[in-house]
Image: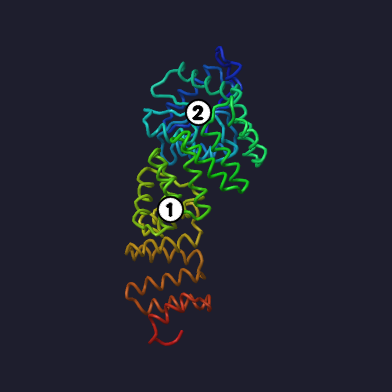
């Protein structure tokens, strides 16, 4: 990360708006980051100007250092601009932070997914300082001087984020009456408040009305899916997610969620299709969620994909015996027997008393036809944990005629 040093900003007509801003520039091309830094200084930005190579680095920075505006490229490795925007909008601290997206083209799909995550504006490549100034001015004025209705909506939104949905509802009810125009976002926020208060019936009614007012307001589909899922109406949840995905096909997080729901409802082939599309579209799992995702892929029978995610997690946490255990299973399911053996032996160096590793090692040796080594591994597992039901069951089933352990 790089930050600006003391400098004398250029004079513009908007110094009073731009000067105090702290801006984070996110792009994997150093030359573009330098160009944006120079433009921001020229426009009068005198606050902190931070830099990040991609969305993952940007999110690490944002968790430690607050920024007023984020200017971010859409296409980057590891975590792209759309994924960073979704992560930010899911965090109360950055739910309303101005986000300016840089893109080479504004296709229908990009517009849909960016609107879903509430991007504030676009900057189309190639651009000049005048275009950057115009977009920044548009964003800042909207945030600093919202219209009467928008100001009320933002007030209600802040109350909801602060855990006071009961106080937000009267404001939203006012916005749903003349002279204000009924908007999908108002009905959707009312639904979120009602859902937070446990009134699921009224929440569903608000979401349904929001969908009728604006069939392309994607947040409503997502919220309906969450509501259906919380009430074990999984088929309806899947239907709403599929409708949302049809409107915004670049949302890889939703593809992953669809895969999970299909697994829960026994639709294995559909689950595999959605989970594969999730990876094919370049989804990047944050470190904290990678192991959970790997388990989902393993459950779906996608062992190669699970192997990759478990391996990535092990790089971050090389002492995690559970990761070795699950990686070994993923390798074994692919008939990668030698790699699985190596994995289990590495695990035993980390923890020589892991009964689960000995148990899986026993199964692996059994698959390889090495019955004595298999039996020795099961004996080790039972020595460490005498009451190990899975190990006992395996021995009863496959070693019935052997000497008792």
Image position of 222 (left or right of 64): left
| Secondary structure at numbered mark 1 | helix
Q: Position of residue 147 (x, y in %)?
A: 59, 22
Image position of 218 (left or right of 200): left
Query: Residue at left 33%, top 62%?
Result: 334
Q: Where is residue 62 in the image (x, y as percent from the top left)?
A: 56, 36
Q: In this view, does 6 lie above or below 112?
A: above
Q: Is residue 310 above or below residue 278?
A: below
| Residue beneath disc 2 | 120
Q: Where is residue 251 in the image (x, y as percent from the top left)?
A: 42, 41
> What number is the disc on residue 235?
1
Q: Front-most of 15 and 49?
A: 15
Q: In this view, does 155 lie above or below 335?
A: above
Question: Residues under labels 2 and 1: Cα distance?
Answer: 34 Å
| Secondary structure at numbered mark 2 | loop
Instruction: State the image quarter where residue 103 is shown.
Output: top left
Instruction: State the image quarter where residue 10 is shown.
Output: top right
Give the label, 2 or 1, closer to the camera.
1
Q: Position of residue 274 (x, y in %)?
A: 37, 49
């Amino acid at each position: 990360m790089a930050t600006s040093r003391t400098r004398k900003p250029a004079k513009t007509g908007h110094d009073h708006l731009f000067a105090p801003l702290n801006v984070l520039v996110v792009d994997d091309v150093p030359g573009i980051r330098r160009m944006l830094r120079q433009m921001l200084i020229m426009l009068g930005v005198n606050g902190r100007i931070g830099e990040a190579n991609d969305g993952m680095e940007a999110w690490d920075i944002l968790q430690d250092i607050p920024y007023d505006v984020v200017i971010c490229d859409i296409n980057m490795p590891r975590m792209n601009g759309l994924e960073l925007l979704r992560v930010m909008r899911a965090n109360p601290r950055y739910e309303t932070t101005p986000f300016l997206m840089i893109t080479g083209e504004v296709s229908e799909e990009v517009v849909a997914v960016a609107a879903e995550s509430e991007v504030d504006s676009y900057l189309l490549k190639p651009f000049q300082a005048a275009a950057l100034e115009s977009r920044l001015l548009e964003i800042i004025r909207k945030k600093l001087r919202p219209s009467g209705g928008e100001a009320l909506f933002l007030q209600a939104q802040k109350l909801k984020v602060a855990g006071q949905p009961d106080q937000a509802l009267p404001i939203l009810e006012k916005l749903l009456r003349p002279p204000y125009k009924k908007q999908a976002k108002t009905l959707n926020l009312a639904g979120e408040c009602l859902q937070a208060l446990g009134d699921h019936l009224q929440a569903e009614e608000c979401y349904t009305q929001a969908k009728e007012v604006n069939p392309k307001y994607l947040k409503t589909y997502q919220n309906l899916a969450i509501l259906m899922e919380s009430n074990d109406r999984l088929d309806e949840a899947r239907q709403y997610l599929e409708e949302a995905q049809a409107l915004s096909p670049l949302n890889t997080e939703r593809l992953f969620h669809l895969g999970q729901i299909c697994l829960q409802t026994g639709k294995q082939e559909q689950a595999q299709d959605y989970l594969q599309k999730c990876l094919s579209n370049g989804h990047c799992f944050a470190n904290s969620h990678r192991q959970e995702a790997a388990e989902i892929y393993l459950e779906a029978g996608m062992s190669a994909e699970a192997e990759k995610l478990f391996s990535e997690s092990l790089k971050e946490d090389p002492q995690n015996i559970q990761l070795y255990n699950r990686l070994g299973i993923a390798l074994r399911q692919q008939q990668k027997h030698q790699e699985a053996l190596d994995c289990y032996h590495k695990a035993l160096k980390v923890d020589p008393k892991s009964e689960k590793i000995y148990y899986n090692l026993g199964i692996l040796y059994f698959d390889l036809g090495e019955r004595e080594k298999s039996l020795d591994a099961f004996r080790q597992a039972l020595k460490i944990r005498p009451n190990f039901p899975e190990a006992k069951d395996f021995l009863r089933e496959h070693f019935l005629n052997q000497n008792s352990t």
